[in-house]
Image (cartoon, rainbow, N blue to C red):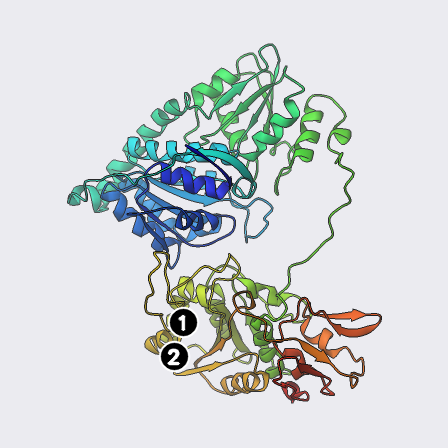
Amino acid sequence: MKQEYIMGNGAIALGALAAGVNVVAGYPGTPSSEIIETITKYPHEDIHVEWSVNEKAAMEVAASASYSGARTLVTMKQVGLNVAADPIMSLAYVGVKGGMVVVSADDPGPISSQTEQDTRKFAEFCRIPVFDPSSPEEAYEMIQDAFDYSEKYHTPVLFRPTTRVCHAYASIQVPEKMQPKKYDGFVKDSKKWVIFPRLSFANHAMIEKRNPEMGEDFSTYRFNILQGGDAGKKAVFASGVSYAYAMEYLKDHPEVRLVKIGTPHPFPESFALKALEGVEEVMCIEELSPYVEEALLKLIGKHKLNVNVYGKLTGHVAASGENNSNSVAAVLAGFLGLDGMKAGMDKTGAPALPVRPPVLCAGCPHRASFYAVKAAMKGRKSYFCGDIGCYTLGNAMPLDMVDTCLCMGAGVTMAQGFHWVDGEGTCFAFIGDSTFFASGITGVVNAVYNDADMILCVLDNSTTAMTGHQPHPGTGINLMGSFVDKVSIQKVLEGVGVKKIVTVDPLDLPKAVAAVKECADMKGVKAIIFKSPCVAITKPQGRAVISDKCIQCKKCIREIGCPALIINDGKVAIDKSLCTGCGLCSHICPVSAISCGDGKDKVSGGAANE
């Protein structure tokens, strides 16, 4: 054995390797991305690892491997589970042969997501089990158990770490060498693997009979824990990282029973009933939905117990957002009749953190792409449909170039909806290169097929930037270390019938503006590929320089909001630690006072606003 100090996501990865995983597939999304990245960094001979084009594809790749007896791991964030909902719902009915664990990392807050959805609810909806780790150490052990339970009950299993578990660090003992499982391969049996209505009906009945049996099995599971409170009348039920917060506070109150629910579905009823013996009041501490709270209420009603249950439904615990040690301390202090305000105070004396809204990086080519469209469409009615990625930040002032953002790929089809209700406006859809492959192509096909009038703007920065610069089909490399043919965005667009396709460097602002104007004056589906690499994967081109010609109009600051443009002693200045020499500001200056420090003068004297 050896000791590793590793992130929670890394612990999940090493746990899967220790369990003998054979195939790993997923789509990057914070807070889950580092799971697959960790597996690629550790010896993984004879294990297939891939970034799939989206979560649905990852789920289906893993499904057939599991049918063959292989152990498979699928990774995503909670909104990615929506994309994979179709296959996982059917898999719940069909079942698997080799252990199949689907990691859906929830994001209470939310910190970096569209929603705060709760994977425990999704597990109940699918009628499959879910494991809810409370720490990196537990995640390492628990995911190995998840593979065992998956094979024991022939079902896919959901694994639900949350952001604070994913990104915490811990020391973990792992084997020196980890080998993938040996499996016997796929055995053809259409009565088992082909999902017909008759099979679904029979398997649904089987699932409903199985789940209570699994709940009984979970009642003796090692990570469903009951501690303390032998003589007390109060109990605290907790799950996930909230258990750690509750344990920290209750270490000074051994009279209170602390109950950890590590397997929320199927609910371990016998374990919970034992934990409720002699208890009169229960406080439920959990994040997102009142899942454990509702399960207890059902159980108490079913057995006609005289127990009062408090939590989110009673307003004692916040209905949304993250818990933390202070908020849980305040809740538990109130539950115990102590000074809740005092308990919830931050005793470190540290000042409040400054509010730092997210912004596009200095030199980000997306800023130039948005500005080109904004300049070209000045005075014309337009709709700007955004998407999920760095470019969502185009909504921030002063750009203000994202009118809508719903989910991955939605911008492409929402632009079409605006066209059908307002033929006077020009409809734009902004989408990144990775998102284009993940979920944008279908929307483009829909636009061509239905003869829509829209402009697709593909912001191609040659990486999946927001989630950590993972490769995608357009980068020419995959996670197995193979150099592969790049999938051409232009050829895909040509193949689905887009007639007008322009590729332009957004940092060449006059040409970018001209391309937008040309497309805006045409009917039908048009596409502009704004191609320029992410500043995080390229070297700075130099630095911008402000000359004495500057008239302090501050137009450069007001127009693009680049973090490298600052006010120093009342004057416009360049933060040399941030500037990449992209040259966008040189195009904007009305008196040509800004030039690039790489010897390539990009001054245009305000050409962008002609």
Q: Is residue 342 above or below residue 454?
A: above
Cβ atoms under marks 2 and 1 closer than 8 Å: yes
Q: Which of the marked residues, 2 or 1, is nearer the chain's N terminus?
A: 1
Secondary element at image label 2: loop
Quick one: quadrant of the N terminus? top left
Q: Does residue 133 appear in the picture of this structure?
A: no
Residue at the (15%, 45%) spot, across then down = 188
Q: Which residue is mark 2?
A: 498
Residue at the (19%, 40%) spot, across then down = 184
| Residue 588's disc number | none
Q: Amino acid at mark 2?
A: Val
Q: Does residue 231 appear in the picture of this structure?
A: yes
Please state the horizontal and vertical placement of residue 500, each as a whole percent of the image.
42, 83
In the visual, does 219 lie left or right of 22?
Answer: right
Q: Amino acid at mark 1?
A: Val
Q: Nearer the viewer, residue 328 or 3?
A: 3
In the visual, does 69 lie left or right of 291?
Answer: left
Quick one: quadrant of the C terminus? bottom right
In the rendered image, the residue lying farthest to the top is 231
In the visual, does 56 lie left or right of 245?
Answer: left
| Residue 444's disc number | 1
Q: Nearer the viewer, residue 63 or 335?
A: 63
Please state the horizontal and vertical placement of residue 481, each as a whole percent of the image.
35, 58
Please state the horizontal and vertical placement of residue 273, each as a whole percent of the image.
48, 18
In the visual, does 365 lie left or right of 263?
Answer: right
Q: Is residue 595 above or below residue 190?
A: below
